[in-house]
Each structure stands twice: as C-alpha cells, then as structure tokens.
Image (tube, rainbow, N blue to C red):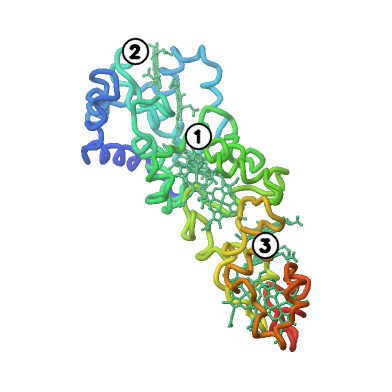
Amino acid sequence: MKVTISTARNLVLAAILAGSWPALAGSVPDGSVDLLKQKFTEGSYSKRGADGCMMCHKRDPQLAAIFDSVHGDPNGKNTPMAGLQCEACHGPQGKHKGKNEPMLTFGEDSPLTAEMQNSVCLGCHQKGADAQWHGSLHDLEEVSCVSCHQLHVAKDPILNPANQSEQCLSCHTRQQADIHKRSSHPIKWDQMNCTDCHNPHGGIGPAATEQPTVNDGCYQCHADKRGPMLWNHAPVMEDCTICHTPHGSVNDNLLTSRVPMLCKQCHGDNPHAGNVPGGNSSINTAGQGCLNCHSQIHGSNHPNGAKFQF
Ligand code: HEC
Ligand code: HEC
Ligand code: HEC
Ligand code: HEC
Ligand code: HEC
Ligand code: HEC
Ligand code: HEC
Ligand code: HEC
Ligand code: HEC
Ligand code: HEC
C-alpha cells in the first residue's frame, strides 16, 4: 500500500476548501468548526508528539493500546507514529491542551461528518480501502470507516473473519432476519461470511460484490453450475437470483418461491397442455412435483436432456 502523510492533511484541507465544513455549523458546538478549519490551515503541529498528548491522556489505558497496533509502530513505513503521531488522525494540537480547543474526533458523536472523518483515513489508505470506496453505497450513505474499524486496539477486531458478519448485521437487520430462515448460506454457523461475497469497501459487481455479474460470484463456489451445458436452462444462464435469494428463504434451497409456483411463473399454469402428447393428464396431476421428472433444472449434458429429465 502506498501511503503519504502529506496527502492526509491535504485531503482534509480539500474537504474544508470544498466548502463542506461550514454546512455543518448547525450541528456542532459553537465555533468548533471554525477552530478546526483554522487548525488545518495554520497546520501548527506540535513538536512533542505522542508523549505530549499522553502526559494528559495516560489515564485512559485504552488509548495506549494503539502503540501495540500497526499504526503505533514508530519504525513502520508511513505509520502515524513514524510521522505526525497522534496528530496524524486527530489534527494539530494547537491550543487544545484540554477542552479549550477541540480535536478531530471519530464515531457517531463526532461533530464531523462521516466524509470528513473518512478523509483523514483515506489520506493514507487510498489503496488500502480500495479506490472502490469512492461512490460505493457505504460511502454515499455516510458510513464511516470507524463504524467497522477500531484504532485504539492492538488488533482491530473486524480484521478477524469470525467477527465480521456480526458487525455487518448490527446495521443490516433484514439480512439478520434472512440468515435465520429455513434455508440460508451457513452464515449463522460462522462457516461463511458476508465478506465472502461482498467487499465492505465497495466492489465492481452488483451490491458491492467482487465479480462483474451475480452469476460469476456464485460460480466461485458453485462451479458445477457454470455452463455452458449441452442443454441450457435460459434463466440459469441469466441470473441465479431469478430463482434463488442469496441470504435466506422460507423455502428449501434458498428458492424465491416454491416449486411448482416457481416454474409456473414462466411456464404458465399448465405447462404440458397441448405439448405433451395427448395433453397427458397424468403428467399434469403428477405435475406438482416438476422436479421429479425435470431433475436437471440447472441444465443437462445428457444427449436426451433437452427437457432436463436426465
Ligand atoms: C490512526 C488514527 C489515530 C491515531 C494515530 C490516534 N487516534 Fe485517537 N482515536 C482514533 C479513533 C478512530 C478514535 C475513536 C475510537 C476508536 O475507534 O478507537 C480515537 C479516539 C481517541 C480519543 C477519545 C476521543 C473521544 O471521542 O472521546 C482520544 C482522547 C484519543 N483518541 C487520543 C489519541 C492520542 C493521545 C493518540 C496518540 C497516542 C491518538 N489518539 C492516536 C484514531 C486515532
Ligand atoms: C494539557 C493536557 C492535554 C494535552 C497536552 C492534550 N490533551 Fe487532549 N484532552 C485533554 C482534556 C482535559 C480533554 C477533555 C477530557 C475528556 O473529556 O476526556 C481532552 C480531550 C481530547 C480529545 C477528545 C475530543 C475533544 O476535543 O474533546 C481528543 C481526541 C484529544 N484530547 C486528543 C489529544 C491529542 C491528540 C493530543 C496531543 C496532540 C492531546 N489531546 C493533548 C487534555 C489534554
Ligand atoms: C498517517 C497515515 C495513516 C493514517 C492517517 C491512518 N492509517 Fe491506517 N495504516 C497506516 C499504515 C502505514 C498501516 C500499515 C500498512 C499496511 O500494513 O498496509 C495502516 C494499517 C491500517 C489497517 C490494517 C491494520 C492491521 O492490523 O493490519 C487498518 C484497518 C487501518 N489502517 C485503518 C485506518 C483507519 C480506519 C484510519 C482512520 C481513522 C486510518 N487507518 C488512518 C497508515 C495510516
Ligand atoms: C462496512 C464495514 C467497513 C467499513 C465501513 C470500512 N471497512 Fe475497512 N475493512 C473491513 C473489513 C471487514 C476488512 C477486512 C477485509 C477482509 O478480511 O477481507 C477491512 C480491511 C481494511 C484494511 C486492511 C486490509 C486492506 O484492505 O488492505 C484497511 C487498511 C481498511 N479496511 C481501511 C478502511 C478505510 C480507510 C475505511 C473508510 C474509508 C474503511 N476501511 C471502511 C470493513 C470495513
Ligand atoms: C454502520 C452501519 C453499517 C454497517 C456496520 C455495515 N453497513 Fe452495509 N450498508 C449500510 C447502509 C446505510 C447502506 C445503504 C442502505 C442499505 O442498502 O441498507 C449499506 C449498504 C450495503 C450493501 C449494498 C451495497 C450496494 O451497492 O447495493 C451491502 C452489500 C452492504 N452494505 C454490506 C455490508 C457488509 C458486508 C458489512 C460488514 C462488513 C456492512 N455492510 C456493514 C450500513 C452499514
Ligand atoms: C452467497 C453470497 C452472499 C452472501 C454470503 C451475502 N450476500 Fe448480500 N448479496 C448477495 C448478492 C448476489 C446480492 C445482490 C442481490 C440481487 O441483486 O438480487 C446481495 C445483496 C445485498 C444487499 C443489498 C440489498 C439487497 O438485499 O439486495 C445487502 C445490504 C447485503 N447483500 C448485505 C449482506 C450481509 C449483511 C451479509 C451477511 C449477513 C450478506 N449480504 C451475505 C450475495 C451475498
Ligand atoms: C463463498 C462460497 C459461496 C458462494 C460465493 C456462494 N455459495 Fe451458495 N453455498 C455455499 C455453501 C458453503 C453452501 C452450503 C453447502 C452445504 O450445506 O452443503 C451453499 C449452499 C447453497 C444453496 C443450497 C442451500 C440449501 O438450503 O441447501 C444454494 C441454492 C446456493 N448456495 C446458491 C448460491 C447462489 C445463488 C450464489 C450466488 C448468489 C451462491 N450460492 C454463492 C457457498 C457459496
Ligand atoms: C429456474 C430456476 C433456477 C435458477 C435460475 C437457478 N436455480 Fe439453483 N435450484 C433450483 C431448484 C428448483 C433447486 C432445487 C433442486 C432440487 O431440489 O433438486 C435448485 C438447487 C440449487 C442448489 C442446491 C442443490 C444443488 O444442486 O447443488 C444450488 C447450490 C443451486 N441451485 C445453485 C444455483 C446457481 C449457482 C445458479 C445460477 C448459476 C442457480 N442455482 C440458478 C432452481 C434454479
Ligand atoms: C424466469 C423464467 C423461468 C423459470 C422460473 C423457469 N423456467 Fe424453465 N424455461 C424458461 C425459458 C425461457 C426456457 C426456454 C424456452 C424455450 O427455449 O422455448 C425454459 C425451458 C424449460 C424446459 C425445456 C423446455 C423446452 O421447450 O425445451 C423445461 C423442461 C423447463 N424450462 C422446466 C422448468 C421447471 C421445472 C422450472 C421450475 C423449477 C422452470 N422451468 C422455471 C424460463 C423459466
Ligand atoms: C411425470 C413427469 C413430469 C412431471 C411431473 C412434469 N413434467 Fe414437464 N415434461 C415431462 C416430459 C416427459 C416432457 C417432454 C415431453 C416431450 O418431449 O414432448 C415435459 C415437457 C415439459 C416442458 C416443455 C414443454 C414443451 O413445449 O415441450 C415444460 C416447460 C415442462 N415440462 C415444465 C414442467 C413443469 C413446470 C412441471 C411442474 C408443474 C412439469 N413439467 C412436471 C414430464 C414431466
């Protein structure tokens, strides 16, 4: 990852100059936006660095945990502690030394918008968070980096796959309900993750997935469903989510509706009428279980598989 410290400040500056900061004025304590703006334009970074901050802030043991993290590495390449230290994220100390002058803060209670908070991180992480972040729905909907990431910890918990789905589900309540339905991908058993299919920083595919089409995403794990077969079933080639929902369903096999209703959506109420020799009524009555006969619903490689029976 390429990191430059100067861009961190420049990005924040750019946000200020773009005029997005003053728009905040109503939602912040009097004058603090002006102060923050001033701090950035003057750029009076403190010379004492982390030591100076910790003299007053050592009472909160949680804060010091950052020294055990990659950000806290004083010898790291372009890490905060190798450069502007605490101020790389919280902005110049200026006349802060207590409550006089606010520092940049992060999280829901911060007077700064998510975009402003994120610009601090993106100053160093344009590659790490992927160029895709810009314009992703998380970006547009003002989700902040720190709604997923923690900084004052030795190891950011979200980087452990075992913690990821839980964090996603704290906001995504519909998926929370879905994964507990009768059939689902094994997310609730922690055998799979939201991030197996989605990139939280945005992706090139539909719904921030990594593959260009829904089907390409499914083929990553269900390669046996990838055609072309000798006999293709058109909707399977088109989009798996015509028949399946990725997160959870009250029907077996993640189906969007139950067979035969699923089939009848496209094949009419009586798919065999006039087609099967004699309008075979035994097929029609048996026909509720379409899959009993059309078992190769994803397509067939059998020479006689045109009707997906073999
Ligand atoms: C890499 C960015 C980064 C660096 C470097 C950093 N912090 Fe933080 N700091 C944060 C974030 C993000 C939070 C919000 C809590 C969290 O996510 O951990 C925070 C929270 C805090 C808070 C609590 C603020 C509040 O909202 O009540 C204090 C105080 C603080 N940091 C002080 C420091 C000090 C002192 C240093 C240097 C030793 C430092 N920080 C270095 C990112 C950083
Ligand atoms: C002279 C003591 C002192 C020094 C030096 C100091 N702080 Fe603070 N800081 C405080 C006090 C007091 C508060 C408010 C107490 C509280 O609410 O936790 C505070 C609050 C903060 C907050 C919470 C947000 C806010 O503005 O209220 C952050 C972040 C912070 N300091 C970061 C820093 C950083 C980074 C440095 C070094 C560049 C630093 N502080 C230096 C005393 C100090
Ligand atoms: C001064 C530059 C700088 C700033 C500002 C910064 N980071 Fe980093 N960050 C780094 C560097 C350098 C690394 C380690 C490089 C690497 O391994 O890719 C890193 C690593 C990380 C990692 C991976 C941690 C790990 O354990 O592997 C995460 C996550 C991260 N940063 C998130 C953030 C977030 C969120 C913010 C904003 C609150 C932020 N960073 C601000 C420079 C920065
Ligand atoms: C919706 C949750 C979420 C948000 C928001 C988010 N991240 Fe991440 N981030 C993750 C997860 C999950 C991982 C681990 C990815 C993995 O394991 O494949 C990660 C990994 C990272 C890493 C380390 C791995 C890498 O890609 O090099 C960095 C750095 C990082 N994020 C920075 C950021 C920054 C900067 C922002 C804000 C612009 C941000 N993230 C916003 C969830 C999030
Ligand atoms: C802080 C709340 C929050 C967290 C945490 C969060 N999201 Fe989101 N996410 C949103 C919001 C808000 C939207 C946009 C509105 C919507 O679709 O619900 C969104 C949208 C999405 C979308 C749709 C993207 C698109 O382009 O259509 C996906 C996929 C997604 N999130 C996945 C994740 C994953 C995976 C995680 C965990 C790594 C996660 N989210 C964590 C708030 C969150
Ligand atoms: C098996 C792959 C897969 C997994 C695992 C997965 N998703 Fe999705 N998700 C998708 C696909 C594909 C879409 C797009 C659906 C469409 O276009 O019809 C999607 C769409 C979304 C959307 C956009 C709204 C919607 O429903 O269309 C959100 C939000 C979302 N997923 C969140 C999550 C969360 C949170 C998790 C973890 C609990 C998760 N996803 C797990 C494949 C997956
Ligand atoms: C990261 C791997 C992965 C991806 C990507 C993936 N799946 Fe799955 N899928 C699984 C696993 C694992 C199972 C559970 C297999 C088992 O229980 O034997 C499964 C099961 C299923 C099932 C059967 C569910 C049941 O109730 O038995 C269907 C249907 C399915 N996936 C469809 C899809 C579709 C559609 C996509 C694309 C949107 C997709 N999968 C993407 C891994 C994946
Ligand atoms: C025309 C509707 C339809 C489409 C489109 C479709 N499926 Fe299915 N799928 C089904 C039906 C019906 C079942 C149940 C089969 C059974 O019970 O024998 C099923 C079962 C599955 C299963 C679990 C049983 C097995 O065969 O492994 C997986 C996995 C699966 N589908 C993946 C996919 C993938 C991946 C795609 C896209 C390439 C897709 N499906 C497209 C109808 C469809
Ligand atoms: C989204 C619409 C759609 C759904 C749902 C659907 N199909 Fe199809 N099916 C098609 C299309 C389109 C064709 C190709 C028709 C053609 O070539 O004339 C087709 C072809 C077939 C054929 C071969 C017909 C022929 O003329 O060669 C059979 C058999 C079949 N489908 C059975 C099913 C069954 C059983 C289900 C339910 C599990 C189902 N289909 C669900 C759209 C659908
Ligand atoms: C008892 C076995 C059986 C059952 C059950 C059955 N089918 Fe068929 N289906 C057939 C046979 C055999 C043919 C092929 C007739 C032929 O080759 O002309 C056929 C042909 C079709 C065709 C292609 C019609 C055409 O124009 O050639 C479609 C579509 C179809 N079935 C859909 C369905 C659907 C939907 C269901 C469930 C509602 C269903 N079938 C249930 C045996 C069955």
- Comparing labels 1 and 3, the label whose residue is closer to the camera: 3
Q: Which residue is mark 2?
A: 99
Pointer 1 residue Cβ closer than 8 Å to ligand 1 = yes
Q: Position of residue 273 (x, y in %)?
A: 65, 80
Q: Nearer the viewer, residue 204 or 57?
A: 204
Pointer 3 residue Cβ closer than 8 Å to ligand 7 = yes
Q: Quadrant of residue 214?
A: bottom right
Q: Position of residue 249 (x, y in %)?
A: 65, 51
Q: Position of residue 110 (x, y in %)?
A: 38, 26
Query: Hey, what amino acid is under mark 1?
Result: His
- Asked if 161 appears above or below 249 in the picture, the reply is above
Q: Secondary structure at mark 3?
A: loop
Q: Nearer the viewer, residue 31 or 252?
A: 252
The residue positioned 60% from the left and 56% from the top of the image is 245
Q: Earlier in the sequence, mark 3 or mark 2?
A: 2
Q: Position of residue 128 (x, y in %)?
A: 47, 48
> Gap between marks 1 and 3, in whole Å?
35 Å
Q: Which residue is mark 3?
A: 221
Q: Which residue is mark 1?
A: 71
**Is 33 left or right of 5, judged from the image as shown?**
left
The residue positioned 62% from the left and 69% from the top of the image is 264
**Is 202 left or right of 268, judged from the image as shown?**
left
